[in-house]
Image (cartoon, rainbow, N blue to C red):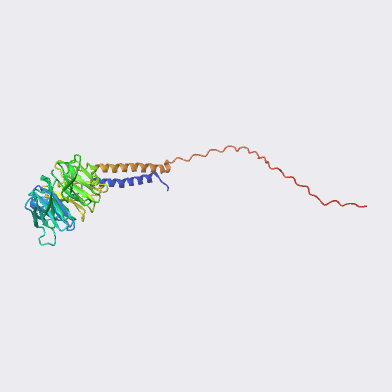
Amino acid sequence: MKWTRGRSARRLFATLGVLGSLLISACGSSEIEVANTPVPAIKGQAGNFDNIEIDQGNHRLYVADRTDQGVDVFDISGPQAKFMKTIALSSPPNGLAISADYRLYAGTEAGSVAVIDINKSSSSLHTVVAEVATGAGVDLLDYNGPKHMVLAANGGNGSITSIDTFTNAIKDHFKVGSRLEQPRFNDADGMVYVTSPDADTLIQIDPADGTIKNNFALDGCSPTGLAINPTLNAAVIACKSHVLAFDIKAGKTAAKFNQVVGGDIVTYNAKMDRFFVASPHKTRPSAIGMFGGKPIAYIASIPAPGRGNSAVLDETNDIIYSPDTRPNQSGVAASPRPSILQAASPGSIAIYAAMVLVFALVFWFVMRSGDPVRRHPPAAAPAAGPAPAVKPMRSWRRTPVEPAIEGPPAPSIQS
């Protein structure tokens, strides 16, 4: 193929244009659009929310609303959340958990766990059908399907209450001692794990008898939220100044990430293999960090102007929801789950730019080298000298002697 300088340049610029447009789109779309659905009763007030839970099958979103002392319900069957109602509770709610038998559990400051019917075909839909007193204020919850058990962290007094979801009866109290944050079941080993910021540890508990099996030191983490991927037998833990990936089987930190600081609640979506770490701040931009993969790695962050302390993924519409605490927008904020390029940080964009530059230099060098104008003419062949005299080769072959031909004998003369 014959190349010219103009043709090489045009191809170079076309290639750079494509790559440049990708970078521009990455930079331009880092400001991800955030939609808002307010709660009418508290609009104009600064919302005070805690946990957020999602019912994927019934397309419902539930938010623990301390301002309105209830659980806000949103219809998320479409791409825009729609407020439905607030389920009134006897005390401001904190943690939430959903069971497989269509029950929503809400831990309250007064020390009880409210059991709410969320079965769409039930006559008692969205009403409190039971209330379980635990004896101390309830913070965060977790549900374990195989064991039909709800864990309620009585964070202030350092204990965990286990509740049978069939009977709504208390099964056990696990006395831990230090202040607790997020309890989680781990289906990989059947153990219960809970974070303790005061002890700076991840605590492993046997749910059969409440025995503390291990205290894993977290080296200055001051942990809050926790979520577990049982397939990897690994966890993501929100720390005061970073995020940890923790190898539960090995009992040690596997990775440390500095992209998200001051995270609160951590959630895990098994279908998408994504951890979401909500990081609310007043003096710096709030964000929601995404982690996942094998091994667990940081993926991206999206802005969270509503300063929500928890986040969940709507699998149907691929939207991330978190509470919105802004006075004129108190409710829920929604952001589309970004691709890696869309949520690229300035550091990653710089890497992409460097890659484009290197590619451009290599491309330019190759094209210039292939341009006939730049090619060196082939070296001239050396002039031919006089042919050397060639002496005839002396033959050493012996010349054969022809043998004498004998004729007939001469006739004899008789007298």
Residue 30 visible? The answer is no
Q: Give the side of residue 386 with respect to residue 249, left or right.
A: right
Residue 185, percent from left and from top: 18, 51
Residue 305, percent from left and from top: 16, 46
Report the front residue among 405 and 153. 153
Rendered image quadrant of residue 158: top left
Residue 117, percent from left and from top: 11, 58
Report the front residue among 150 and 72. 150
Q: Give the side of residue 343 with respect to residue 392, left or right.
A: left
Farthest residue toward the left?
90
Residue 146, percent from left and from top: 19, 55
Residue 150 visible? The answer is yes
Rendered image quadrant of residue 365: top left
Q: Give the side of residue 401 with respect to residue 305, left or right.
A: right
Report the front residue among 394 and 160. 160
Farthest residue toward the right?
415
